[in-house]
Image (cartoon, grey):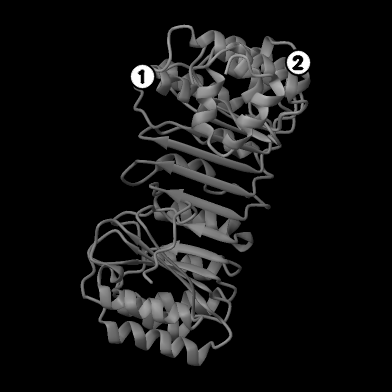
Amino acid sequence: MSQLTADCLYEILEYLEDDKFTLYSCILVNRFWCEIAVRIFWRNVFHYKIGELLRNQQNFSSQGLYNNKYIIVVQEIFKMFMNQISSLKSLVFLYYSNITFTLYPGAKDCLKNLTELRCNSNISSEFFYHLSQICYNIQSLNIKIEGIISNGLEDLISSQKNLKYFGIELFYYFTDKEFMNTIQLLMSKLPNTLIKLDLLGGYHCISLSFIINFKNLKELQLSFNLSENFEDFEILRYVVFPNLRILKLQHTRPKFELLINFLENNGKNLKELYVCEYSGCGDNSLNLAITKFCPNLLKLSTGIKNNELETLKLIFNNCKNLESIKIWCGDEYLSEKEALEMILKYSQNNLYELILYHLFDARFKLLPEELESFFKSWLNFKPQRSISLIIVNYDTNSLDTYHENIEIINKYIKLGVIKKFKVTDFGDEEFNVSPYFIS
């Protein structure tokens, strides 16, 4: 094979275009093979995940397929990458490495129009510093905080003048006050051009004072594993965000009076509202405030207790544009039967998606005849509107665990009453999960 011409080898390796793992192996044979295989690997590339390449290099090493010279091959790959891609738009670099490919020939032209970057915080300071000298128009920046925050990260954030989205993820518990102060410093460097902000703080309470500057925010997500009374929300209590359309409070519960005041000032423009999802989050005063201050909602997730059916009725009557609702089921919240009955009786014609969120075991088993009655009634009342049914199931006895119910669901999928049915154990239905269907 070593005597093959470049054209001949190219034709052979073309058959591996969809087999990325084998292509990686070909890249590692020698420099000649690497040059040919890389052309195929990068064919029509617009979004390339360098971190994936490096992780696969590790896999080869752990399997005995790669020796300690792998770093030389990686460097050559990056050099060819910088030369062959004239304008990279999106970069995912989730790997600690001393390879400063930002210095390679062609790097400036390749990276100057970068608009999306997702990376770890512990990449070398040189990497971030060089990016700050090349990239001035990053619009989406997502940082996963590891045990080290490189000094150059501050330079990169400070150099951005048109940043639209910023996300930060802390999934490890850090107790070092200086470390947390560094995170707060990074937050203070963000430009006021942000329209979307995601703070996934884990068990850390990041001060929200810097958010006040972002009056153009359209979407705000706060996720902290704090059991209750997220007191720092007091800072935002009376702040007005005239463009805010989406508010997500994941695993985060401010005091209800703070959130009610916030909704009084910002609820009218909200299109999507997601209230934190764990026991005790549902509150009737909050839900009544939603009916009063959030009339234009399209999507809603909140906890309605089984003695608050009248409040759910008010939500449907006052939020007439509602297209999707997540109803919590089990324990002190509604049973599946109650949820389905309320949907039939009071939902408006816009509703097309029902999400049943099972954090707790259902109090009563939903009988097959009750489920079929719901679909028959839906067909009679809303013959021109199919419904999507999503079950969020944390190992509970929800309706999808019974074969008879699945048979009924399949029946109404075929009749066109059900547009989509899926089961997931994720709290956020935006995750990509496969539809649940039994033929």
Residue 198 appears at what percent x and percent y?
53, 40
- At horizontal 70% and vertical 30% (from top left) the residue drawn is 138
Q: Is residue 85 left or right of residue 404?
A: right
Q: Please state the horizontal and vertical placement of residue 207, each as a whole percent of the image.
A: 48, 32
Residue 332, located in which quarter of the rendered image?
bottom left
Other-residue count near label 2 (Cα within 10 Å), few / some / many at <14 / 14–19 / ≥20: some
> Which mark identifies residue 62?
1
The image quadrant that residue 14 belongs to is top right
Specify whether residue 159 is in view. Answer: no
Which element type, helix, strand or loop, lies under badge 1? helix
Q: Amino acid at mark 1?
A: Ser
Q: Residues within 10 Å of mark 1 (few under 14, many from 20)?
A: few
Residue 82: x %, y % from top left: 71, 19
Above or below residue 189? Residue 166 is below
Sequence order check, earlier mark of 1 and 2: 1
Residue at the spot 56% in from the left edge and 15% down from the top edge: 74
